[in-house]
């Protein structure tokens, strides 16, 4: 006899969690779509512009590594132009901030009404300083260090192309929550197919991601290419030298980084895994938006100056990208 699954059984299979993804661009939309596909009690997605409107009307379409559509009636879509949805006041279990670096503080302030004392906070925005900002604002007891290496871009509003499969890493930052506190989130991300990992050293986790970003994003943005184009010998050597300038500063701050050889291997692996991805900085340049250069290469330059160390390549890239912003 065939076994029939009741609606109640389907609902019970879902995780009893309320999730919020604020600042849902390419990466945030991918995370939201994968979690919504797996199934949670509620998932709130806060976005803006044509992309947010398209998601509100038609849901999220994912293409690339996987193809599926998450209908709009299985999510709560909140638009920046209207205001943050307040029907889940103090009920969010896990908050993902996935916005551009420039918008992190604004979204932190908006999210307060959604959270409670047990809420877990994960900021996946690019750059240096966000974890510290979140800890100062929310307190250290519920903030994880985090990074993401999945590649995603938006071919059109409401559509996200999953261009490269990577992982989401969570880590302990200072006196913040540890692995036992992260198990529920790791389980959710694993069941959603987002490949979570745990890193005991959250500072190393953040810096490892920043080093990849400063090596890939500005070079790809200036050339106007997919990430994979950077595997050409001369370009990869350039990207590596930019990254190692930054690694020198991280080591000045007593961050326990891998060896230069391991860093180069990781850089090569990320470029290869996201070879068909157009990085976020290139997308910003093409659309005339502000880039995240102040939180990436410029942040490295600023920290280097504290130690009296020269970072000429990062400085040049910062100036070139900023000139594109003002052109």
Image (tube, rainbow, N blue to C red):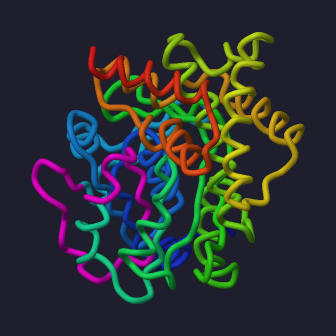
Q: Which residues are magenta?
A: 78-106
Q: Seen from this angle, which residue lies furthest front?
A: 308
Q: Is residue 327 above or below residue 69?
A: above
Q: Image check: 177 left or right of 200?
A: left
Total number of numbered discs in the rendering: 0
Q: What is the x, y in percent for residue 158?
A: 33, 35
Depth order, front residue of 307/1: 307
Q: Is residue 132 above or below residue 61?
A: below
Q: What is the x, y in percent for residue 125?
A: 46, 50
Residue in view at x 36 percent, y 48 percent? 24
- The quarter in which the C terminus is drawn is top left
State the image quarter where residue 46 is shown.
bottom left
Depth order, front residue of 71/140: 140
Residue in view at x 29 percent, y 28 percent? 289
State the image quarter where residue 230 is shown.
top right
Q: What is the x, y in percent for residue 213?
A: 59, 37
Q: What is the x, y in percent for residue 272?
A: 75, 26
Q: Is residue 244 above or below residue 40?
A: above
Depth order, front residue of 117/200: 200
Residue 241 located within the stretch drawn in magenta: no
Depth order, front residue of 104/115: 104
Q: Image check: 169 left or right of 120?
A: right
- The quarter in which the N terminus is drawn is bottom right
Q: Image check: 236 left or right of 68?
A: right
Q: Image check: 75 left or right of 316?
A: left
């Amino acid at each position: 006899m065939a076994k029939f699954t009741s609606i109640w059984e389907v609902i019970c299979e879902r995780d009893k969690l309320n999730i919020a993804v604020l600042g849902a661009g390419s990466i945030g939309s991918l995370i939201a779509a994968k979690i919504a596909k797996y199934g949670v009690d509620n998932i709130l997605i806060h976005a803006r512009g044509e992309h947010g409107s398209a998601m509100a009307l038609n849901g999220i379409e994912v293409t690339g590594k996987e193809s599926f559509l998450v209908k709009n009636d299985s999510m709560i879509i909140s638009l920046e132009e209207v205001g943050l949805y307040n029907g889940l006041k103090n009920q969010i279990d896990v908050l993902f901030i996935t916005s551009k670096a420039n918008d992190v503080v604004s979204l932190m302030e908006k999210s307060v009404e959604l959270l409670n004392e047990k809420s877990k906070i994960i900021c996946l925005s690019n750059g240096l300083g966000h974890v510290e900002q979140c800890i100062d604002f929310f307190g250290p007891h519920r903030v994880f260090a985090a990074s993401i290496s999945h590649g995603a871009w938006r071919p059109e509003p409401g559509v996200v192309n999953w261009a490269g499969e990577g992982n989401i890493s969570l880590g302990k930052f200072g006196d913040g929550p540890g692995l036992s506190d992260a198990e529920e989130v790791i389980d959710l991300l694993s069941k959603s197919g987002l490949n979570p990992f745990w890193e005991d050293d959250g500072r190393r986790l953040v810096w490892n991601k920043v080093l990849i970003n400063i090596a890939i994003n500005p070079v790809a943005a200036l050339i106007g290419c997919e990430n994979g184009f950077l595997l050409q010998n001369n370009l990869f050597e350039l990207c590596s030298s930019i990254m190692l300038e930054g690694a020198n500063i991280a080591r000045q701050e007593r961050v326990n980084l891998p060896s230069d050889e391991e860093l180069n291997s990781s850089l090569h692996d990320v470029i290869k895994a996201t070879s068909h991805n157009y990085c976020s900085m290139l997308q910003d340049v093409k659309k005339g938006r502000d880039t995240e250069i102040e939180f990436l290469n410029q942040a490295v330059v600023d920290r280097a100056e504290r130690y009296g160390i020269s970072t000429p390549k990062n400085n040049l890239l910062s100036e070139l990208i900023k000139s594109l912003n003002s052109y």
